Image (cartoon, rainbow, N blue to C red):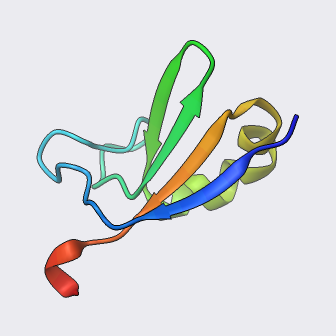
Amino acid sequence: MTIALDTITTALNPVVDRCDRCGARAWVRVVLEDGQLTFCDHHERRHRAALERVAVRIEHHVDVRDS
């Protein structure tokens, strides 16, 4: 499966969008065919190989307040 690794310039909502593994602020959204997952940077790196096999798209978000 081919995936696109997109970096977008809109922020995830830091209050609502939390890592699905640990609850930290989410910086990565993994879009699947039947839903989505959100991860902190640590857990995205830890599970990257598995995510790349099933993802339709992986979005790395940036904090627009730092721009």
Q: In this rendering, is residue 10 above or below 22?
A: below
Question: Can you name the residue that lies furthest to the right here?
Answer: 1
Q: x and y percent of residue 55 in the render?
A: 69, 34
Q: Is residue 48 left or right of residue 42?
A: right
Q: Is residue 59 left or right of residue 19?
A: right
Which quadrant holds the C terminus? bottom left
Count of all numbered marks drawn on residues in the image: 0
Q: Residue at x 17, y 49 (%)?
A: 13
Q: Residue at x 51, y 52 (%)?
A: 59
Q: In this rendering, is residue 30 above or below 8?
A: above
Question: Of 48 and 3, which appears nearest the observer?
Answer: 3
Q: x and y percent of residue 26 in the render?
A: 34, 52
Q: In this rendering, is residue 10 above or below 34?
A: below
Which quadrant holds the N terminus? top right
Quarter location, residue 46: bottom right
Quarter location, residue 17: top left
Q: In this rendering, is residue 5 above or below 67?
A: above
Question: Of 17 and 47, which appears nearest the observer?
Answer: 17
Q: x and y percent of residue 36 in the render?
A: 48, 27
Question: Can you name the residue that lies furthest to the top here?
Answer: 34
Q: Residue at x 55, y 33 (%)?
A: 31
Q: Is residue 13 left or right of residue 38?
A: left
Q: x and y percent of residue 20 in the render?
A: 41, 35
